[in-house]
Amino acid sequence: MALSICAIASEAAPFAKTGGLADVTAALTKYLAGAGHDVRLFVPLYSSVDRARFPLSPAGISRSTTLGAHTYAWSVHIAALPNSSARVHMVDCPALYARGGLYTSDGDDHRRFLLLTRAALECCQHLGFQPDILHCHDWHAAFGPLFLRTLYGWDRLFAGTRSVLTIHNIGYQGVFAAHDAADLGLGDNAHLLHQDDLKAGRINALKHGCMYADAITTVSPTYAREIRTPQYGMGLEDILRARGAALTGILNGVDYDEWDPRTDRYVDLNYDASSVSVKGELKARLLTRLHLPVAAGVPLIGMVSRLAAQKGIELTLAALPRLLAARKLAFVALGSGEGGYEYALGQLQRDFPGRVVCHRGYNEELAHWIEAAGDLFLMPSLYEPCGLNQMYSLRYGTVPVVRRTGGLADSVQPYDPATGTGTGIVFEEPSAAALEAALGGALGLYAQPQHWRRLQANGMAQDFSWARQGALYVALYEQLLA
Ligand code: ADP
């Protein structure tokens, strides 16, 4: 049965991306459209969207919406999602989206995404588009399920609509001050807000999604278990436990149109499992480009990451200097984020000249080069809802070194030299010593070509395509509608 799906998210690649969320919303939309469903994805038209690269056409919808004491004029533009028949609806509201970045710490950040959510639902009304499923991503869209029952509960258009909240990262919950409650426009339904939070002076967007969505998903089965515990639930564990089987985990897929060494358009040379030695040439070229005079046989460890505590940057900064001092290896990191980490990585580069490059910033091309040219890929995350780079690394024959958490645990199997099974190096303890030991083990295997080739081949044979993962979302939608 072809379904109608309204999806709401703060990011969609390639238009607006800070991390994996953008990859997932775009790829899931592409999968759903390809499978014959009518999917409309709504995202903000940020001022950073490159209109020269992505032509937009007006959808003929101009309205204004009042959030508390604020009234915002908005309109909708449509962009074609590359390699897909799907169209992305971009909500144009310069008063809210013409800012320095996708996210801000401005006092109206909650209104930026309340408007997005309401504009998506009002656009459905305007278009007469009757969604079977309202799919809300992260805190930005998490009031969608409650709005369906309240502000738009009168409209028969939504009478059959079931809601799904996908949690891509529970570390970001969209908390704002209770004195902004009027911005939600709930009126007589304000009692549906989490009352203890209100008394404590705050409103937590993600929590309301967890309370009112018909189904909650997160982006790996392990993370779905983890966020029910105080260690990982970031305060939402009780509510999530109470929702029982309504919470499930669906591992993200990989868009192999973008991330496949056989067709990668960013790197000079393409390869597959039978020509993996091409990586050596790519490594030489990357090292030359980065001015790292490292001999061919020296292993190259790569890292591409948002620089946030979640990503285990502190473990990296503690473990790498000792390893670099003791062993022959090179390290290339790409990332941006917290200033302290950016500085510390810069210091690592200064401490190990000619062996370490820490490139600050966001750079799609360099990210592909690091995946293709690296020998190992480092992801020592303290928590990781899914993680995409470890899955990219597997396909590129770049052996991932990961901590056993969330999606890392679900996508990388520890290599067992006795049986030759497994796809990466997995460690447990979130400590620098455990990371150092894991990297030591990885370098030991690198020195044994028969094991290394096996590890690479095992990883390259893995398939995390959306064809499989997307079907799991459709099965969930169908189950909700049954
Ligand atoms: P998260 O969403 O927590 O940042 P994921 O591993 O799920 O982590 O997704 C990260 C995505 O963002 C990947 O596609 C990765 O290549 C990309 N990425 C992260 N930082 C950078 C950067 N500095 N430059 C280019 N791409 C980046």
Image (cartoon, helix red, strand yellow):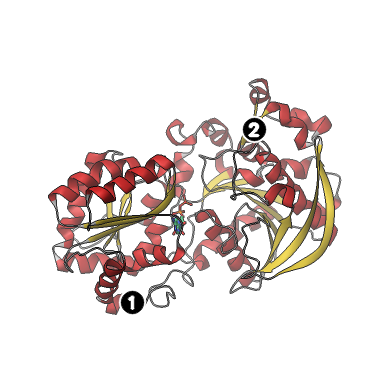
From what the image shows, is residue 355 above or below residue 282? Answer: above
The secondary element bearing badge 2 is classed as strand
- Which residue is at the front of the view, 285 or 132? 285
Residue 239 pos. (x, y %): 57, 33
Give the quadrant of the C terminus: bottom right
- Which residue is at the front of the view, 78 or 358? 358
Give the quadrant of the N terminus: bottom right
Residue 421 pos. (x, y %): 25, 61
Disc 2 within 8 angstroms of ligand 1 (CB)? no
Q: Nearer the viewer, mark 2 or mark 1?
A: 2
User: Which residue, given by chain and number where applicable, does mark 2 sit on?
Assistant: 176
> Is 211 situated left or right of 60 in this image?
left
For the point 33% across and 43% down, which residue is it?
Answer: 344
Residue 59 pos. (x, y %): 79, 65
> Is 269 situated left or right of 351 in this image?
right
10 Å neighbourhood of mark 2: few (<14), some, or many (≥20)? some
Numbered mark located on residue 272 in the image: 1
Can residue 423 be seen? Answer: yes
From what the image shows, is residue 201 above or below residue 223? Answer: above
- Which residue is at the front of the view, 305 or 232? 305
Q: Quadrant of residue 148?
A: top right
For the point 53% across and 35% down, which residue is it?
Answer: 241
State which tag comes first along the sequence, 2 or 1.
2
Ligand 1, seen in the image, is in the quarter at bottom left
Residue 85 pos. (x, y %): 66, 73
Can residue 418 be seen? Answer: no
For the point 53% across and 60% down, which residue is it?
Answer: 23
The secondary element bearing badge 1 is classed as loop
Amino acid at the residue labelled 2? Phe
- Which residue is at the front of the view, 384 or 155? 384
